[in-house]
Amino acid sequence: MKSRIDKQAFKSVTRRELLKLTPVVALGAFVVPKLRDPLLKAGLGFSDWASGVMYRSGHLASTFENSELTPFEKFPINGYDVEDPEVDLDKWRLNVAGAVRKPGEYSMAQIQSLPKQVHNTRHVCVEGWDVIGNFGGALLSDFLKSVGADTTARFITMQCADDYYESLDMATALHPQTLLCYEMYGAPLTRKHGAPVRLNIPTKIGYKQAKYLTDLKVTNVLDKVGYWEDQGYSGFYGL
């Protein structure tokens, strides 16, 4: 019979104790080549699981003064496929489906009718750079409430105009800093930065913050985790 690990007990495990497992995984992965991929995949899965268990849903990412902002023109632009998928901004709608009471298409005006939050937070890229940016938009939690989302569901999935796709665990979706972001530096998102709406998630790595959003679904099942995750990257990757 499989043993069960109490979440509260697990949260008491120190980071140092968890890191003691690293040499064991690394030894198996690199000494026995044929076991490398499955062991690394298992190790990544364990890391994502552990990160999810220890995630503090009320813990806020650091915020910064305006004087600490990276100038907008120096904020790097990362694209998955193309820098501008040429979204028709006038006709754009966010299609909402899954475990919600009010599925359908939602306009920018409807999203902007929700209370706006603005914060200066750090954006961290898996490539090794980070910048401090100014982001504005509606809390994703407020939007989910407005569409009658079942917040006991496990995941939110997103599709994008450039065919990128991503997912979030529900705790991150409900975090008090996770935004449906439609502004940067006090102005509407530019096309290269993800117009008309992108995710801004200060508690997550950059590739989780999908741009050019077109579809959002509340679900308990993930057919796909995310574009980079399905190529071997972390599915949780909290900061």
Image (tube, helix red, strand yellow):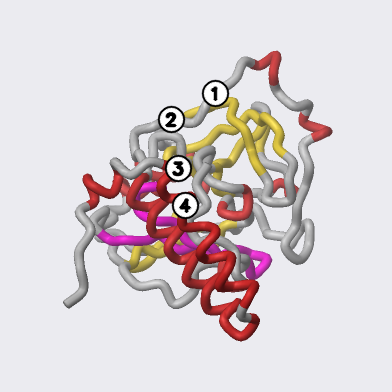
Query: Mark 1 — residue?
Result: 63
Label pair 3/4, CB-CB below 8 angstroms: yes
Q: Quadrant of the N terminus?
A: bottom left
Residue occupied by mark 4 = 20
Kind of residue at badge 2: Leu
Secondary structure of the residue carrying tag 4 is loop
The quarter of the picture where residue 229 lies is bottom right
Q: Residue at x 68, y 66 (%)?
A: 162
Position of residue 19 relative to residue 49, above or below, is: above
* Nearer to the camera, 159 or 1: 1
- Marks 1 & 2, CB-CB < 8 Å contact: yes
Mark 1 element type:
loop
Span highlighted in magenta in the image: 153-172
Viewer-proximal residue, 219 or 131?
Answer: 131
Q: Residue 141 appears at what percent x and percent y?
A: 36, 43
Label 1, label 3: how many angstroms apart (C-alpha)?
27 Å
Answer whether residue 168 is magenta in the image.
yes
How far is disc 2 from disc 4 in space, using C-alphas? 28 Å
Q: Which residue: 68% across, 59% down?
A: 87
Counting from the top left corner in percent of width and height, residue 100 is at 29, 61
Label 1 vs label 2: CA separation?
8 Å
**Residue occupied by mark 2:** 60
Earlier sequence position, callout 2 versus callout 3: 3
Q: Amino acid at mark 4?
A: Lys
Residue 174: image x %, image y %? Answer: 36, 44
In this orientation, which residue lies closer to the viewer: 146 or 31? 31
User: Mark 1, mark 3: which one is toward the viewer?
Assistant: 3
Residue placed under numbered mark 3 in the picture: 16
Q: Position of residue 2 (x, y in %)?
A: 21, 73
Q: Are marks 4 and 1 in contact (CB under 8 Å)?
A: no
Locate residue 153: give its quadrant. Answer: bottom left
Instruction: Name the amino acid, label 3.
Output: Arg
